[in-house]
Image (spheres, rainbow, N blue to C red):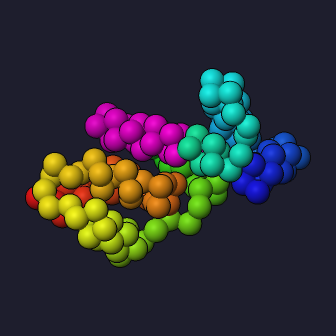
């Protein structure tokens, strides 16, 4: 479904001569094709979500660097790209939803210390993949296990 939306949006961007959107979609499509070839898998929504998440993470990291360099022009450009990318991600979970999932998993795996972090992450990851920033999820788990 998301892959079809990506293809349709690419055609629409070409027709409407929306260069910004077309550039971002082409970058996603190129990264998607690279992943397909590297991993020897079919293109599906899960693969697209993984690729888009990587693209979002790269842009968030870039924004941090641009802030350090006081490059407001590049920050604005990158934020526009982020907004386009977010169209291809599932609805993000709220902070409460993420906390509930983490609490349930901590109870399920009987986690009591930071040593259990790996077990908790292994259970939480599939439930929040693509729906929450994993760095944020990791920080919450650390704070709950400490």
Instruction: State whether residue 121 is above or below residue 109.
Output: above
- Compared to 66, does 135 lie above or below? below
User: Can the viewer see residue 63?
Assistant: yes
- Main SS of residues in magenta: helix
Question: Which residue is found at the position 56% from the left and 66% from the top?
Answer: 91
Locate residue 121, reporting x and y percent: 33, 52
Residue 114 position, x and y percent, is: 15, 52
Residue 16 in picture, x, y percent from top left: 84, 49
Q: At x 38% / y 58%, what residue is drawn?
A: 124
145 in relation to 52, above or below? below
- The residue that appears at 72% across and 54% down in the rendered structure is 2
Q: Is residue 78 left or right of residue 146?
A: right
The part of the image, by quadrant, that contains residue 120 is bottom left
Percent coordinates x, y for residue 97 in the rendering: 40, 74
**What span is colored magenta in the figure?**
52-69
Residue 103 is a magenta residue: no
Task: Name the residue nearer the viewer: 32 or 55.
Answer: 32
Which of 2 and 83 lies nearest the eye of the viewer? 2
Q: Residue furthest right?
A: 15
89 left or right, relative to 145? right
**Residue at the top extreme?**
38
Check the image and report above or below for 36 versus 49.
Answer: above
Q: Quadrant of the N terminus?
A: bottom right
* Between 109 and 17, the one nearer to me in the picture: 109
| Front-lying residue, 72 or 105 | 105
């Amino acid at each position: 479904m998301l892959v079809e939306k990506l293809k349709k949006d690419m055609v629409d961007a070409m027709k409407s001569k929306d260069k910004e959107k077309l550039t971002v979609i082409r970058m996603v499509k190129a990264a998607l094709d690279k992943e397909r070839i590297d991993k020897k898998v079919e293109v599906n929504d899960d693969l697209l979500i993984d690729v888009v998440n990587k693209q979002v993470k790269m842009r968030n990291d870039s924004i941090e660097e641009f802030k350090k360099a006081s490059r407001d022009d590049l920050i604005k450009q990158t934020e526009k790209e982020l907004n386009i990318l977010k169209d291809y991600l599932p609805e993000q979970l709220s902070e409460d939803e993420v906390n509930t999932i983490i609490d349930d998993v901590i109870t399920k795996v009987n986690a009591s210390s930071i040593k259990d972090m790996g077990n908790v992450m292994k259970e939480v990851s599939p439930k929040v993949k693509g729906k929450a920033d994993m760095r944020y999820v990791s920080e919450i788990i650390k704070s709950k296990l400490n």
